[in-house]
Image (cartoon, rainbow, N blue to C red):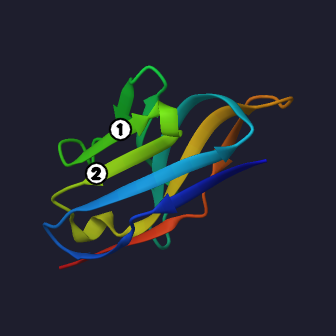
Amino acid sequence: QVQLVESGGGLVQAGGSLRLSCAASGTIVRIAAMGWYRQAPGKARELVATITSGGSTNIADSVKGRFTISRDNAKNTVYLQMNSLKPEDTAVYYCNADLSLLLRNRNIYWGQGTQVTVSS
């Protein structure tokens, strides 16, 4: 079993900042990549940012220059620093991990989501 526990969401005014955290726990053998996706009401879930175990990142154009993804491999934790937030960043943010568990095949796992609301 694996758990992805997210924290750091909340309500912030436009121009403000938030930092999301996601910690993976369980019988984890290896985490290939972790990342963040978001889903706004009435819209499809979209990629925000991902980071591999080697530190390679993929950032959505809509947040490039404002959001930064980082990772602590020793803690199996990924962070999303969100600056200069805009109302259109309002969404439920989901943590995602591509990992292998002991005696299990590699698979994709999701957190429960954390709400980020940016007021204008």
Q: CA distance from mark 1 to mark 2?
A: 8 Å
Q: Is residue 50 left or right of residue 63?
A: right
SS under mark 2: strand
Taking depth in this image into account, of 63 and 67 the one nearest to the observer is 67
Q: List x then y, in percent, for residue 79.
A: 38, 47
Q: Is residue 44 shown above or below 90?
A: above
Q: Where is mark 1, residue-wise?
A: 70
Q: List x then y, in percent, for residue 98.
A: 62, 35
Q: Where is mark 2, residue-wise?
A: 81
Q: Quadrant of residue 82?
A: bottom left
Q: Residue at x 39, y 65 (%)?
A: 8
Q: Is residue 116 left or right of residue 68?
A: right
Q: Residue at x 49, y 52 (%)?
A: 22
Dots 1, 2 in contact, CB < 8 A: yes
Q: Quadrant of residue 104?
A: top right
Q: Residue at x 80, y 30 (%)?
A: 102
Residue kind at label 2, given as amino acid type: Gln
Q: Earlier in the sequence, mark 1 or mark 2?
A: 1
Taking depth in this image into account, of 38 and 74 the one nearest to the observer is 74
Q: Residue at x 16, y 72 (%)?
A: 14
Residue 44 seen in render: no
Q: Residue furthest front?
A: 74
Q: How many marks?
A: 2
Residue kind at label 1, given as amino acid type: Ser
Q: List x then y, in percent, for residue 20.
A: 38, 57
Few, some or many C-alpha atoms within 10 Å of disc 2 (few <14, some 14-19, many ≥20)? some
